[in-house]
Image (cartoon, rainbow, N blue to C red):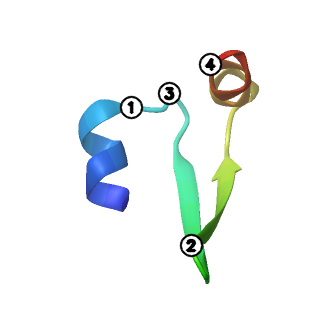
Amino acid sequence: MRPTLASVWHPIGGVSILNLGRERYLFHFYYEVDVERVMKN
């Protein structure tokens, strides 16, 4: 999943992605701008 996201989306401040299992992921964004971009789309 990480390579796919990296190829189509480039967060400004960075993001950490943790695989929680069972097709669940935890995204930790480092800048509010990135969170706002995700929430708008």
Q: Which mark is residue 41?
A: 4
Q: On the rendered image, what quadrant is the C terminus found in?
A: top right
Q: Is disc 3 placed on a helix, strand or loop?
A: loop
Q: Is disc 2 placed on a helix, strand or loop?
A: loop
CB-based contact (under 8 Å), mark 1 and mark 3? yes
Q: Earlier in the sequence, mark 2 or mark 3?
A: 3
Separation (CA) of disc 2 from disc 1: 22 Å
Separation (CA) of disc 4 from disc 3: 16 Å
Q: Is disc 1 placed on a helix, strand or loop?
A: loop
Q: Which mark is residue 12?
A: 3
Residue 29 vertical placement versus 25 (above, below): above
Q: Report which residue position mark 1 lands on.
A: 10
- x and y percent of residue 30 in the render? 67, 43
Q: Residue furthest front?
A: 22
Q: Earlier in the sequence, mark 2 or mark 1?
A: 1
Q: How many marks?
A: 4
Residue 33 vertical placement versus 4 (above, below): above
Q: In front: mark 4 or mark 3?
A: 4
Q: Earlier in the sequence, mark 4 or mark 2?
A: 2
- x and y percent of residue 40 in the render? 70, 15
Q: In front: mark 1 or mark 3?
A: 1
Q: Is residue 8 left or right of residue 15?
A: left
Q: Which mark is residue 23?
A: 2
- At x 75%, y 27%, the residue is 32
Residue 10 vertical placement versus 4 (above, below): above
Q: In front: mark 2 or mark 1?
A: 2
Amino acid marked by disc 4 = Asn
Separation (CA) of disc 4 from disc 1: 14 Å
CB-based contact (under 8 Å), mark 4 and mark 2? no
Separation (CA) of disc 1 from disc 3: 6 Å
User: How crowded is the residue under tag 1: few (<14 C-alpha within 10 Å), some, or many (20+)?
Assistant: few
Q: On the rendered image, what quadrant is the N terminus found in?
A: bottom left
